[in-house]
Image (cartoon, rainbow, N blue to C red):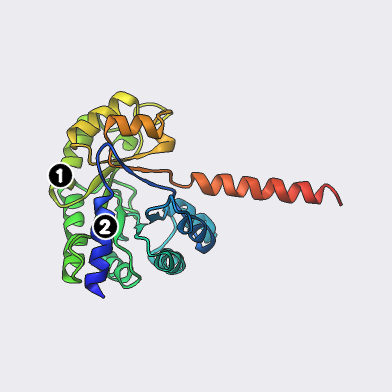
């Protein structure tokens, strides 16, 4: 079982190619996961904690490990049925529950996580070394479970907390040195998100091992991000917003006929 799971992890890690990025259309429940998993164009599934929390009737800041795992259990079924890798937005891995969280995710067949560097309890950044150590701890659990190719997408929130690009690069390099596959930089210097020159600087600093949120990439397209040389593109809760807007509009159209 572990060998099969690590093969899946290895195949997922191989999708992270600078200049030919894996594109993840984040899911949040069984139905959205099945919809994406069934697409021939889909190579992997990824959750977005914000969307998972909304679907569970809570918010991103309030969601706990148990609520997240309950959603992942159903999403993992869709991923496993389609034989596609699944990575999970595990927020900060819930403080002291980090090892428990990763073990339970591996039990469900998950081969990667999005790991934040902000403490959910205090809403403050972990120290650089503390955050890097949490990356190492995730990978130590995975290695002990015979999944050494487990993928960590290390999110860095320095910019959204008012820090500098230089600090972001310093942290990102530390996370990569700790074993992260990619760094996900959240926020930017403008309301539109991360500016093109910032994306270019980050991609260069991380040798392309950069995850960019399409929504926050200041209007950059997938084609432009590929040209810049990023390795991973995600969309967060964007599809959930679109899906619920379409659902509401369809319902309203029917109700107005009554």
Where is 111 relative to 123, above or below?
below
Where is 198 relative to 89, above or below?
above
Mark 1, secondary structure of its residue: helix
Q: Measured from the top left, where is residue 127 in percent x and y?
A: 19, 47
Seen in the image, is 33 located left or right of residue 88? right
Q: Measured from the top left, where is residue 10 in percent x and y?
A: 23, 59
Going 41% across and 31% down the picture, which residue do you hit?
221
Extreme residue toward the left, this view: 177
Q: Which mark is residue 258?
A: none
Mark 2, secondary structure of its residue: helix
Going 35% across and 26% down the picture, which residue do you hit?
195
Extreme residue toward the top, this view: 197
Seen in the image, is 42 located left or right of residue 98? right
Going 18% across and 37% down the picture, which residue do you hit?
207
User: Which residue bears the numbered disc 2?
Assistant: 11
Q: Measured from the top left, where is residue 214 in percent x and y?
A: 41, 37
CA gap between label 2 and label 1 equals 24 Å
User: Which residue bears the numbered disc 1?
Assistant: 174
């Amino acid at each position: 079982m572990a060998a099969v799971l690590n093969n899946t992890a290895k195949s997922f890690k191989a999708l992270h190619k600078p200049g030919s990025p894996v594109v993840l259309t984040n899911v949040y429940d069984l139905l959205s996961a099945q919809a994406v998993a069934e697409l021939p164009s889909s190579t992997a599934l990824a959750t977005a904690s914000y969307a998972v929390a909304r679907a569970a009737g809570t918010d991103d800041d309030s969601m706990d490990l148990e609520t997240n795992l309950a959603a992942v259990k159903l999403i993992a079924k869709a991923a496993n049925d389609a034989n596609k890798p699944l990575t999970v937005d595990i927020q900060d891995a819930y403080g002291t529950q980090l090892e428990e969280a990763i073990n339970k995710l591996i039990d469900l067949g998950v081969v990667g996580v999005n790991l934040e560097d902000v403490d959910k309890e205090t809403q403050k950044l972990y120290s650089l070394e503390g955050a890097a150590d949490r990356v190492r701890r995730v990978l130590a659990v995975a290695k002990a479970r015979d999944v050494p190719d487990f993928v960590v997408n290390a999110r860095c929130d320095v910019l959204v907390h008012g820090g500098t690009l230089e600090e972001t690069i310093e942290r990102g390099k530390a996370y990569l040195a700790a074993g992260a596959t990619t760094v996900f930089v959240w926020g930017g210097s403008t309301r539109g998100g991360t500016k093109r020159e910032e994306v270019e600087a980050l991609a260069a600093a991380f040798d392309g091992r950069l995850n960019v949120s399409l929504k926050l990439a200041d209007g950059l397209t997938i084609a432009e991000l590929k040209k810049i040389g990023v390795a991973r593109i995600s969309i967060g809760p964007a599809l959930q917003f679109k899906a619920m807007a379409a659902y509401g509009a369809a319902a309203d159209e029917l109700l107005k006929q009554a």
